[in-house]
Every structure is written in C-alpha cells, then in structure tokens.
Image: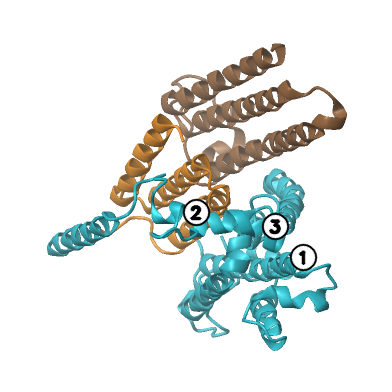
Amino acid sequence: MIFAFDFIILIFMVVAAIISLKVKDLLSASMIFGIYGFLICLLWAEMGAVDVAFTEAAVGAGVSTVLLIATVYNTKRKSSD
Amino acid sequence: MLSKVFATIAVVITGGLLLFGVYDFPSFGDPNSPPNAGAEGGGESVSQYFITHTYKDTKVPNLVTAVLADYRGYDTMFETVVVFAAGIAIFCIMRVVGNANDPRQKKEREGMHSFTYGDHNRIIIGTTCRVIVPIIQLFGLYVIAHGHYSPGGGFQGGVLLGASFILLALSSDLNSALKRFSEYNYFKLAAVGILIYAGFGLTSQFLGENFLDYGVLQPLLFTDGPEMARSHSMLGVEIGVAFTVMAIMFSIYANLASQGTLKDGL
Amino acid sequence: MIVSVISAIFILVGIVFFAGAAIGIIRFPDFYTRTHAAGKGDTLSSLLVITGFALYQLNGFESFSEDWPILLVILKLLGVSIFILFTSPTATHALMDAGWEECSKPKIKEGRPNHLGDDSDQF
C-alpha cells in the first residue's frame, strides 16, 4: 500500500462518480462510469486483491460499459433530469 | 424538485446508517482484530485457518480460488444462479418473438451501415477482430484452466469468452455472431453450466457426504487422494460457472443491442 | 545496473509521449487531430513503457537453469505489447471511422485546399 497513490485514485474515483451522476449526456455518463470501474480495478490491484481486480477490469470496465452504451443507443441520449 | 429533496434525504440517511454500521469494525490491518487474531479466548481465526489449511486440504496454491469454489462453494453456486436469473430477466423483459406488427420490429434505424467483412470501410476492423477474437478466447480458456495457480477462475474467464463474442458482434454484425452462438445454444449452455455445478454437489451428496463436499468424489475422478479430488472438482465447477457467465453475458448484449428482436444489433 | 538504466530511459520516454498525447487531446482543434494524437501517442508510449518493464525484469537474470521464470514474465509482457500494437491503432481507426460516419467536421483554415475529395459534400 502506497498512501499517496491510494489517495489520488480515491479522489479520482469520487470525482468520476459525481461527474457520471451530474452529466446530462448519457453516453458520456456511461463512459465516465467505465472510467470509475477501471479506477476501482486499479485500486484493488494496488491493494493486492488481484482476482477481484481482474473481475472488475473484465466486467466493470469492459462488458458493463458496452451494455450501457447499447442501452443508450436504443433509448435516448439526453437525460431528462 | 421535491423528488430530489427526498432522494437527497434518503441517500443521507442510508449513508449515515452505513457509516454507523462500519463504526465498530476493526481498523484496516489491525493485527488484534478478530479476523486476524482469532476469537477471544484463543481460537484460531478464519484467515489463519485458510492460510494454513488450504494447501494441505486442496493442493491449490491460489487461496482465493480455493475459498471461492470449495469452502464457500454454496455461495458461489447461488452467485452463478443470480447471473442466470439476470439473463432470464433481461430475456423476459426485452425479447420480442415473431410479431410482425410490433413497432419495434419495424423500426428503421437512421444512419446505420451494415458491418461486414467484405465492406471496404470495415476491412481493417474486421481483419483485426478476426485475429484478436481467437486470442481472447484462448486467454479466457487459460484463465479458467489456470485459475488454481494464478489469478483467475470461472467468472473472469467466462466474461472474457463472452466479451469475445460481443467483440465479434460489434465488429461485424449481430447476425454473424448469432450464427456462431445462437440463442438456443446460449441458453442451453447457461443451464448446463448451473447443472454441472449442482451436479458436483449432488454427486457428493449421493456418495454420503455434505452438498459440495468434493473430497468424497475421489473414486469417480481416479485421483490419488481426496485433496486432488477437491482440486479437480474445483476445476469442473469453474468450467460450469464459465459456461453460464459466457452465455448470459452474450445473451444480455444481444437482447439489449437489438431491442429484443435479435435482428440487427449495433 | 546498466539494464536498470536502459529500462528507466524507456519508461521515461514513454511517459513523455503519454504527456504529449494528453496535451494533444486537450489542445488540438477538432475531432480528427485529437484522435490522431491519442492513437499515436498512446500506442507508442504503451509499447515503450511495457518494453521498459520487460527489460527491468532482466535485472535478476544470472543463469538460465535457475532464472527461467523471468523469461516467461518477459514473454508475457512482450505478448501484451504486441497485443497493444495491433489493437490500439485499430481502436483509433474505428473511432475515427465512427466520427466520419457521424459527419464530424474537420477544421480547415480559410483558403487552404480541401483534400477531402468527393466525400467532402457530405457535410
């Protein structure tokens, strides 16, 4: 564990989470959600939980982004709130 | 506006309850906490038990896989069932079967181009994906089979295999991916995956032990001892998990991308 | 020792190219030039950094009979770099192709010749 590295990743994670909730364009929101998943994966790999990080890299950053984009493509792109 | 206020209140209350819940937890890396030092009165802790006994019991160097597929096998089985149920739920919500008057069937997509290998615009993407997909599938098989010795296992390998089919569907079109892995096949494979998992459990139950107690499968697997029987059964269970995860990943993508018609995807 | 220095040089040059790619994404004017910066810089810098890691692994290598697992690690890292060499430019190409299909307009200075050819009337 390196404290500075952890701290930077956690700050980026909070920023990515808030932006993905706030942004109106749903395609950007799903891309930023993918970035959030990748940052979690990085944090887990850095903490030594390589198995969990591997799952998160495959599911959170890879497949779930594709599924979200497929959904956005078939519905509408602008958020209504 | 009012709904946002209520949502904020709900989030704050839930977050407060969660923080209140973790208030009593031992701090990170505390050597005297119960998971690390054992229960009060000198009992052996859970972490210590796994670290000292896993290799002796199962001959699996990767403790995570051993805990996931053997000691916590019941949990993992129902995780797989949850994945299967998610696929079935998406199927029930999205799938449109054969009604020509359904507006979703008729919907014309503006600006869509057919992605085919022959199309000169897509030749770079098509060729690269044709080369990359077998490599991804080989890596997925490696992750499943080598999950005992290195990070990996059924879920990760299954997701990689499913992602390779999704890549095929993205780079060409959904129909050419469905030609290789049809709807009938993927749901059959998803059910077979869970049946493999439950079959290992039931077999050990029929042989007179607890559900998912793999050590008793030794005479069926022709291994040297119950330890190797547990190791090999873990591999079988991981293969079942990988089947289900791969099939369900692709089915969710196919249903979401084509609005349930399975005609033309993204 | 010399291997460490060489690998450090590789990694540093890779980081410089990463910085160039990041600055390019922010500073370039239109979609195509930004994607160009991302694709070129990202591919080259990833290759350099991973090659630097592979060279760094050679540090403890003394005899083949004892240290052969290090060669396996190097082989895996080189495999990753070859994978990136093929996939990253293809991803950039796919992105640019999608932008072209969506009629993203390139920024061309007034009075400069337009080399878009017959396709330029799609805008």
Tell me where residue B67 appears, x and y as whole percent.
Answer: 59, 62
Q: Do labels 3 and 2 touch, CB within 8 Å? A: no
Q: Are marks 2 and 1 on the same chain?
A: no
B117 relative position to B72: left or right: right
Q: Which residue is mark 3?
A: B60
Q: Which residue is mark 1?
A: B228
Q: Which residue is mark 2?
A: A60
Q: In which quadrant is the N terminus of chain C drawn?
A: top right
Q: Classify mark 1: residues with Cα within 10 Å, few (<14), some (14-19) or many (20+).
A: many
Q: Secondary structure at mark 2?
A: helix
Residue lying farthest to the right in this orientation: C65
B212 relative position to B19: left or right: right
Chain letter of disc 3? B
The residue positioned 60% from the left and 21% from the top of the image is: C11
Colour-to-chain, brown: C
Indicate the quadrant where residue B254 lies: bottom right
B263 relative position to A76: left or right: right
Q: Secondary structure at mark 1?
A: helix
Whether residue B206 is visible, yes or no, is yes
